């Protein structure tokens, strides 16, 4: 069943998986030296990134500052934080101690194993910290780009109904971009679909008819780390089902 979902010739240009931790997570600042000269790190983000760094070709740290201004007394409070960047030629992992998030990005997507192996390792490291860890939001986004040289090509890619919507708008005089947004309630999560002609030459009038199909599956609300993998697998299935509902069947067969 899982193999039926694999599209060997997929047109995914970018894949993003983001997990935002709850704001009350215990990641108190403490001194941590010998990482690119930076002085501050958090227990959580530093523990994950350092323990995983040998599994990535590139390991970088970036020291950032956030400034908060008290409008009553104009006092400026500076907060330093570290952003960790781990990457290979195909995958990147960003761990942000200020936004309290983990982001996995892929430029070459094959199937869910492309990111699940990385995520599983991150979850293992988090569980080893032996602290309560919950997320407040989990999101998965697939951005597909399909080449089209002319308006009539749109009907070869999208299903008849959605192709009609796009074609009716792109032929309007002077139009520079045509994107349609649909949002769906799917149980305890939401799906946002954006599709159409973004026009890479924007704000010039549309001359390039490449189609974008951008599918974002996400959920809010607190979730225990123990449920993350199950939720993400469910999101993957939901994204696939949404994808095939927008694509013409004959074109879908060319992607398998």
Image (tube, grey):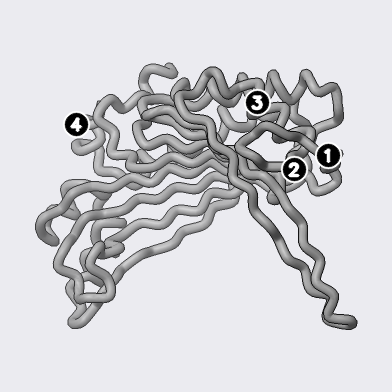
Quick one: label 1 or label 3, which is nearer the N terminus? 1
Q: Mark 1 points at which residue?
A: 30
Q: How far apart are marks 4 and 3 (CA)?
A: 42 Å
Report x, y in % for residue 47. 72, 27
> For mark 1, does the 10 Å Cα neighbourhood hold few (<14), some (14 to 19), or many (20 or more) residues?
few
Between 101 and 152, the residue placed more toward the observer is 101
* Tag 1–tag 4 contact (CB < 8 Å): no
Q: How far apart are marks 1 and 3 (CA)?
A: 15 Å
Q: In which quarter of the image is residue 9?
A: top left
* Tag 1–tag 2 contact (CB < 8 Å): yes
Find residue 50 and name its label. Answer: 3
Q: Quadrant of residue 91?
A: top left
Q: In which quarter of the image is residue 209?
A: bottom left
Between 249 and 22, the residue placed more toward the observer is 22
> For mark 2, does the 10 Å Cα neighbourhood hold few (<14), some (14 to 19), or many (20 or more) residues?
some
Q: Name the residue under label 2.
A: 40
Quick one: label 1 or label 2, which is nearer the N terminus? 1
Q: How far apart are marks 3 and 2 (CA)?
A: 14 Å
Find residue 254 and name its label. Answer: 4
Q: Is residue 59 above or below residue 211?
A: above
Q: How far apart are marks 2 and 4 (CA)?
A: 50 Å
Report x, y in % for residue 44. 76, 33
Report x, y in % for residue 139. 58, 43
Secondary structure found at label 2: strand
Mark closer to the observer (4, 3): 3
């Amino acid at each position: 069943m899982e193999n039926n979902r694999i599209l060997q010739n997929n047109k995914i240009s970018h894949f993003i998986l983001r997990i935002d931790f709850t704001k009350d997570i215990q990641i108190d600042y403490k001194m941590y030296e010998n990482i690119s000269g930076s002085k501050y790190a958090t227990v959580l983000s530093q523990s994950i990134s350092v323990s995983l760094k040998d599994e990535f070709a590139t390991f970088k740290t970036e020291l950032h500052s956030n400034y908060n201004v008290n409008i009553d007394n104009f006092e400026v409070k500076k907060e330093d934080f570290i952003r960790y960047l781990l990457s290979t030629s195909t995958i990147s992992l960003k761990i942000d101690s200020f936004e309290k998030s983990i982001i996995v990005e892929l430029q070459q997507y094959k199937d869910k194993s492309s990111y699940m192996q990385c995520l599983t390792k991150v979850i293992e490291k988090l569980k080893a910290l032996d602290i309560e860890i919950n997320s407040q939001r989990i999101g998965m986004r697939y951005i597909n780009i399909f080449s089209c040289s002319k308006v009539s090509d749109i009907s070869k890619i999208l299903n008849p109904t959605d192709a009609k919507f796009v074609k009716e708008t792109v032929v309007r005089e002077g139009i520079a971009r045509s994107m349609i947004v649909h949002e769906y309630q799917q149980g305890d999560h939401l799906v946002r679909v954006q599709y159409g002609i973004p026009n890479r030459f924007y704000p010039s009038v549309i001359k390039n008819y490449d189609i974008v199909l951008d599918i974002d599956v996400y959920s809010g609300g607190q979730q225990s780390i123990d449920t993350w993998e199950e939720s993400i697998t469910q999101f993957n299935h939901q994204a696939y089902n949404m994808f095939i509902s927008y694509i013409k069947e004959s074109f879908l067969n060319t992607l398998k």
